[in-house]
Image (cartoon, rainbow, N blue to C red):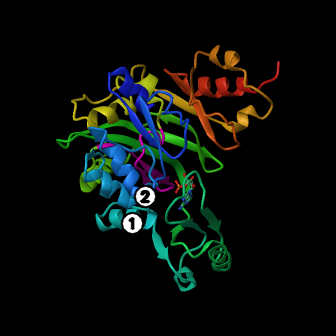
Amino acid sequence: MLALAARRMGYRIHVYSSEAGSPTGAVADQETVGSYDDAEKVAEFARTVDVLTFEFENVAAECAAAAEAVTIVRPAGNVLHITQNRIREKSFLRGHDIPVTPFRPVYSPADLEDFPYPAVLKTAAFGYDGKGQQKVASLQQAREAFAAVRPQPLILEEFIPFRREVSVVGGRSVRGEFFHFGVMENAHANHILDVSQGPVTVAGPPIEIARRIFEELDVVGVMCVEFFETTDGAYLVNEIAPRTHNSGHLTIEACTISQFELQLRMVCDLPALQPEYLRGTGAMANLLGDAWDTGEPDWAAALATGAALHLYGKREPRAGRKMGHLTAIGPHAVETVFEARRRLTQKP
Ligand code: AMP
């Protein structure tokens, strides 16, 4: 989606990917295949571009450093370094007085004691879409979960009985201007983002918190800050996703400028105006590989609702794999994306 925005504005694109034939490769001018911990290869690639950004957070710190030695990297490698590890990320936020889910790093079974259960035990790195995390009801369960996943560093978080999950997709320019798409509400199914809608009205300060995080991290580019809205109306940061495509992709149809074009403008040091919603509101429903369970989904039936379809061109529709999304805008956006998705798998 970022490459499509770049293509439209006449940029040439060179993508670095761990797999040949990536969706971005299909719209890029050039594709380099390499691993995300091969600093030499990343440096060789980085020499060919004027500005480098990333859409994947699990890139080794040495690779970001190697790229920074030869080209402009936005957001900077230290933003990636902090946000790719839950312990570093939450410690950074807590150190800057930003409200986060109460947590504790776990290196040995002793670290599991004297913690308020139920809790969630997560791997500190390489976890997303609920991978590498487990809800633990008691100290005993936490010990069992620890034994199953060590020796990697873990983080123990209080289980938050949230009212809803909301996020702020924001962007910051080289000069420190901050842009955002308001507050979006996100519903998850099996720990995977299911439906986003925005903007929603909130009583609290998520946009202000997001702005502070961007400033403290000195971000240039677009990121998503995810929050739990607790039952007593507080906002706790759950995580920062340094990926433009993390959530809220409804902005492609719904806003005067999409989050992808905003990302492009921020990293290429071009001006932007604060995004606005064209028809007040928008909604997005993810399409997982499960939709192919009973054969090819009925695209025509879904499109007849007026929803827009995005398919990423991934070849294999595996269960739980994000294959694309549906978007609708205007006052009936949420109902429309639900109906469109329902029709995909409805048998005549
Ligand atoms: P994460 O990978 O940390 O974004 O977690 C994925 C999803 O799991 C979140 O969007 C929540 O729905 C749920 N979750 C994660 N951490 C917690 C927590 N501390 N309390 C309650 N739910 C959580």
Residue 326 higher or lower than 151, as above or below: above
Residue 140 higher or lower than 21, as above or below: below
Q: Which residues are magenta?
A: 221-247
Viewed as shown, does residue 267 lie left or right of 148?
A: left
Which residue appears at 46% of the width and 55% of the height? Answer: 58
* Residue under numbered circle 1: 88
- Dots 2 and 1: beta carbons under 8 Å? yes
Return the x and y of residue 85 as percentages of the image width and height.
44, 62
Nearer-the-camera pick, 291 or 64 = 64
Under tag 2, what secondary structure? Answer: loop
| Residue 13 falls in image quadrant | top left
Amino acid carrying label 1: it is Arg
Amino acid carrying label 2: it is Gln
The circle drawn on residue 77 is none
Ligand 1 located in image quadrant = bottom right
Which residue appears at 36% of the width and 27% of the height? Answer: 6
User: Can residue 206 be seen from the camera position used here?
Assistant: yes
Q: Main secondary structure of the magenta part?
A: strand
Return the x and y of residue 157 as percentages of the image width and height.
51, 67
Under tag 1, what secondary structure? Answer: helix
Return the x and y of residue 290 as percentages of the image width and height.
72, 38
Circle 1 packing at 10 Å, graded few (<14), some (14-19), many (20+), is: some
